[in-house]
């Protein structure tokens, strides 16, 4: 069983930057150009409503007889849980929320009950609910100001595991729930600030981790029989470890580690003799590993230059499972049925949003269950992304994902945007990206930068931004503008910057610290005041609070430095049009971060547009808000980046 633990890199990531297709294009280390004879391709430009008409789908859990799939979708405008036959067919709603998002977690292994999670208006205080066979709902984690995480069912389906911070808001304890009565017992009381990793199938062994910095932690093994906890990974220097899964017989723990190397490899710890051994490695980060229910299959995902490649191995023969031919893209969200006879998974590509498939092992083809792309959009009207690189100011190579509009040519130069991901240690990846495709379709070149400090390119690159925010990583964004200006289909005088969360901070920092570089900035829920953000982090981030301080700065001992890199204290330097979007219930970047920067910049007599959603948190998940927010972004860009401001009356 593997636990969905809180990981710093995902906590601040921009939701729109998600992993993508399987085979990256050739890397272009020199600027691409357009042949002089190339003519402008006509392309139908779509309003935001057409893009948001695309259906989002996520998650997969098989019914006990494996005839149906439980999954989540925003088909209704907000996320709800649904079921459908594994052979395809009509969807049956499990939940019908019209306000708060509900996400499916698991089908009970022996009957028709389901587990779902829901927060309140994007505040991230998720509770776990059971949907009974008659459709009634029960909150299994009642209480105020608590956060609950479903982990998994035990092997025979008689119990399931939940982490909550109800005892101590700073740390998560581990509970076992009886699958029939919902009576629970606490398996682990977390008084030492561990992050819960994986629990062995026999419930004896619990993997834990303790974070020192964002690129250094230790992995521990807790024996529930003896109560002893041992450090599995004593080391010197920086090394990262992540518990992935125990073997079906509870004898071995699989974990990821970059100790002694740039990239994470898959390793095994043999509990009986304390031996560590390598299992699998690559020239890139292995990002996850999962056994199927009884250990027949091992599923491994590797982040290859911004795309995730998935392998499935028969553990007895050690031979790879060859999957049927699938559309171009990458495999995501693999879920193998408890019988180990079939699997559900998603295929996602640059021009193809998530599509749900099922496959019976050994069958000649997989069954596609969904059609997600809006029927108003032809996939040919969308663009393929490409991986490009440029040398930054100090010679460091910076990888990027580039979306080039069909209509961009040397004779039809287009404005461009530097798109900055969340994090700090996130990654812009290939795959279907709603905002990038929407902007490209409407005539904007989009360069998704992976500035120094991004994940996926080795631990040295990942650590290269520590205590340097507002400086070297920001300079990479300025150099990204220079790269865009080298492309003969880009209008070099019309380049803006856009980003969410940490990317929003970079947008504000670019306008404040390099005020003449970008023509406009679009900040989605970005940090403007690091002092306040670091002092107001959610209590359940306590286990990695010190790591965050090591990464950004300590508000108790480095106040002057944090003031120096916070755009709010330098807002008087911002002279270019700014747009800010914010969720009122955001627990990570609170409303005041956006309120204050908007008020400060407006004093400069600079055009500032501000959009606040009362029912959103860190990111915009409801379709009505995406239509409004992304639609207003396009109007803003058309006015101030493609144009030179509002048209003046004659």
Image (spheres, rainbow, N blue to C red):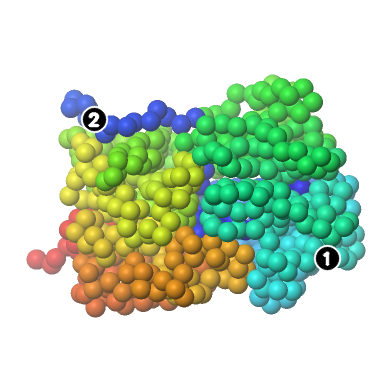
Residue 366 shows in this picture: yes
Secondary element at image label 1: strand
Q: Is residue 29 above or below residue 551?
A: above
Residue 290 x, y percent position in the rendering: 71, 40
Nearer the camera: disc 1 or disc 2:
1
Residue at 36 percent of width and 76 percent of height: 596
Q: Residues within 10 Å of mark 1 (few under 14, many from 20)?
A: few
Residue 515 x, y percent position in the rendering: 22, 62
Q: CA distance from mark 1 to mark 2?
A: 63 Å
To which residue does mark 2 refer? Answer: 34
- First along the sequence among labels 1 and 2: 2
In the picture, measured across the screen, residue 31 lies left or right of residue 615, that is left
- In which image quadrant can residue 113 be found? bottom right
Residue at 28 percent of width and 71 percent of height: 570
To which residue does mark 1 refer? Answer: 186
In the picture, measured across the screen, residue 24 lies left or right of residue 361, that is left
Asked whether disc 1 touches disc 2, contact meaning CB atoms under 8 Å apart, the reply is: no
Q: Is residue 607 above or below residue 115?
A: below
Q: Is residue 361 above or below residue 394?
A: above
Secondary element at image label 2: loop
Residue at 21 percent of width and 26 percent of height: 35
Looking at the image, which is closer to me, 52 or 340? 340
Instruction: Report the number of numbered marks.
Output: 2
Residue 414 x, y percent position in the rendering: 23, 43
In the picture, measured across the screen, residue 399 lies left or right of residue 331, that is left
Residue at 34 percent of width and 60 percent of height: 470
Quarter of the image that includes the C terminus = bottom left
In the picture, measured across the screen, residue 603 lies left or right of residue 311, that is left
Looking at the image, which is closer to me, 242 or 509? 242
Residue 131 shows in this picture: no
Q: Residues within 10 Å of mark 2 (few under 14, many from 20)?
A: some
């Amino acid at each position: 069983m593997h636990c969905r633990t809180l990981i710093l890199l995902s906590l601040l990531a921009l939701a729109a930057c998600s992993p993508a297709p399987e085979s990256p294009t050739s890397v272009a280390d020199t600027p691409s150009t357009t042949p002089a004879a190339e003519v402008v391709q006509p392309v139908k430009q779509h309003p935001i409503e057409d893009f948001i008409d695309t259906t989002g789908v996520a998650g997969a859990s098989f019914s006990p007889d494996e005839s149906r799939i439980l999954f989540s979708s925003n088909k209704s405008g907000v996320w709800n849980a649904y079921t459908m036959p594994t052979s395809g067919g009509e969807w049956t709603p499990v939940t019908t929320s019209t306000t708060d998002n509900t996400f499916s977690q698991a089908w009970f292994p022996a009957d028709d009950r389901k587990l779902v999670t829901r927060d309140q208006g994007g505040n991230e205080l998720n509770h776990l609910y059971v949907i009974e066979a008659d459709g009634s709902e029960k909150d299994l984690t009642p209480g105020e100001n608590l956060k609950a995480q479903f982990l998994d069912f035990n092997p025979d389906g008689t119990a399931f595991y939940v982490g909550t911070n109800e005892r101590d808001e700073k740390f998560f304890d581990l509970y076992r729930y009886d699958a029939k009565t919902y009576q629970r017992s606490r398996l682990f009381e977390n008084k030492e600030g561990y992050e819960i990793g994986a629990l062995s199938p026999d419930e004896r062994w619990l993997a834990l981790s303790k974070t020192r910095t964002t690129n250094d932690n230790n992995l521990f093994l807790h024996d529930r029989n003896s109560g002893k906890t041992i450090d599995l990974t004593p080391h010197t220097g920086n090394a990262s470890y992540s518990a992935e899964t125990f073997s079906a017989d509870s004898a071995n723990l699989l974990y990821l580690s970059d100790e002694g190397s740039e990239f994470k490899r898959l390793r095994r710890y043999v509990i009986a003799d304390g031996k560590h051994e390598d299992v699998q490695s690559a020239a890139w980060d292995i990002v996850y590993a999962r056994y199927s229910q009884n250990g027949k299959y091992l599923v491994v995902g590797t982040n290859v230059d911004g795309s995730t490649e998935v392998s499935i191995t028969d553990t007895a023969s050690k031979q790879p499972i060859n999957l049927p031919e699938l559309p171009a893209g990458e495999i995501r969200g693999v879920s193998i049925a408890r019988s180990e006879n079939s699997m559900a998974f998603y295929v996602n590509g640059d021009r193809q949003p998530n599509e749900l498939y099922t496959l019976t092992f050994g069958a000649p083809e997989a069954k596609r269950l969904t059609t997600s792309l809006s029927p108003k959009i032809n996939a040919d009207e969308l663009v393929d992304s490409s991986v490009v690189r440029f040398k930054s100011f100090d010679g460091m190579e910076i990888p990027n994902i580039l979306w080039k509009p069909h209509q961009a040519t040397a004779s039809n130069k287009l404005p461009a945007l530097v798109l900055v991901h969340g994090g700090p240690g996130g990654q812009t990846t290939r795959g279907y990206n709603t905002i990038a495709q929407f902007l490209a379709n409407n005539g904007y070149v989009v360069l998704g930068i992976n500035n120094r400090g991004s994940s996926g390119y080795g631990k040295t690159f990942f650590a290269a931004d520590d205590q340097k925010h507002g400086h070297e990583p920001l300079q990479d964004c300025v150099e990204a503008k220079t790269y865009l200006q080298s492309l003969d289909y880009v209008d070099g005088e019309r380049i803006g910057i856009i980003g969410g969360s940490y990317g929003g901070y970079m947008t504000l920092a670019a306008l404040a610290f390099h005020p003449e570089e970008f023509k406009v900035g679009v900040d989605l829920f970005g940090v403007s005041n690091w002092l306040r953000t670091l002092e107001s982090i959610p209590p359940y981030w306590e286990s990695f609070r010190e790591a965050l301080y090591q990464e950004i700065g300590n508000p108790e001992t480095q106040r002057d430095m944090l003031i120096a890199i916070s755009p709010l204290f330098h807002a008087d330097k911002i002279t270019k049009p700014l747009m800010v979007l914010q969720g009122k219930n955001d627990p990570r970047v609170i409303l005041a971060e956006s309120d204050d920067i908007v008020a400060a910049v407006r004093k400069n007599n600079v055009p500032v547009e501000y959009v606040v959603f009362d029912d959103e948190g860190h990111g915009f998940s409801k379709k009505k808000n995406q239509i409004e927010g992304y639609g207003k972004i396009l109007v803003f860009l058309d006015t101030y980046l493609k144009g030179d401001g509002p048209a003046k009356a004659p």
